[in-house]
Image (tube, rainbow, N blue to C red):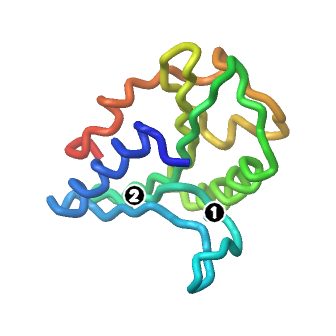
Amino acid sequence: MKNEFETQIDRLITKINQNGYGFGWKNHPQRTDAGLYIKGEPFDYCILCRNGNILCFDAKAIHSKTWRLQPKDIKQQTNLLKAAMNNKCKAFFIVYFYIHKAYRIIHVANMYNKKTIKFEEMEDINLETFLQYDKV
């Protein structure tokens, strides 16, 4: 489901691609030609930065104080962990908590064997600063 900060990320990727700062894209689920769902995307976004870093991440929006990982989230975490095997890759989730009106970030390596993750267990992130395309 698309949310406001996914729209911000989409704008960032457009600027990165247009200005030569790197190359980024949003992954999409596989569908038939008729639009029927086949399977989900491995994670939401990938950005290849001009400085050689790779950012792979998924964006979530949560309506409670705790993120309860669903089977889809665990599959995305597994895929992000595979991406993070490249030492230039930073793999993480950015989560918006509606209750706190705040963004948080958690690196996939810090999620091992967790079924729930509390707001307090994640790092604070200023999304506007983090997503400045001239910094990647």
Amino acid type indicated by mark 1: Pro
Q: Residue at x 57, y 34 (%)?
A: 61
Question: Can you tell which quarter of the image residue 133 is in?
Answer: top left
Q: Residue furthest left?
A: 19
For numbered disc 1, what is the local secondary structure? Answer: loop
Q: Dot 1 corresponds to which residue? A: 42
- In the drawing, does residue 45 fall left or right of residue 69? left
Amino acid type indicated by mark 2: Ile
Q: CA distance from mark 2 to mark 1?
A: 14 Å
**In this view, 32 is above or below 53:** below
Instruction: Of the two numbered discs 2 and 1 on the same chain, state the one appearing first in sequence.
Output: 1
Label 2 environment density (alpha carbons within 10 Å; few <14, some 14–19, many ≥20): many
33 or 28: nearer the viewer: 33
For numbered disc 2, what is the local secondary structure? Answer: strand
Question: Can you tell which quarter of the image residue 13 is in?
Answer: bottom left
Contact check, label 2 and label 1, Cβ < 8 Å: no
Q: Position of residue 127 (x, y in %)?
A: 38, 30
Q: Dot 2 corresponds to which residue? A: 47
Q: Position of residue 136 (x, y in %)?
A: 30, 47
Q: Residue furthest bottom?
A: 33
Q: Position of residue 57 (x, y in %)?
A: 53, 49
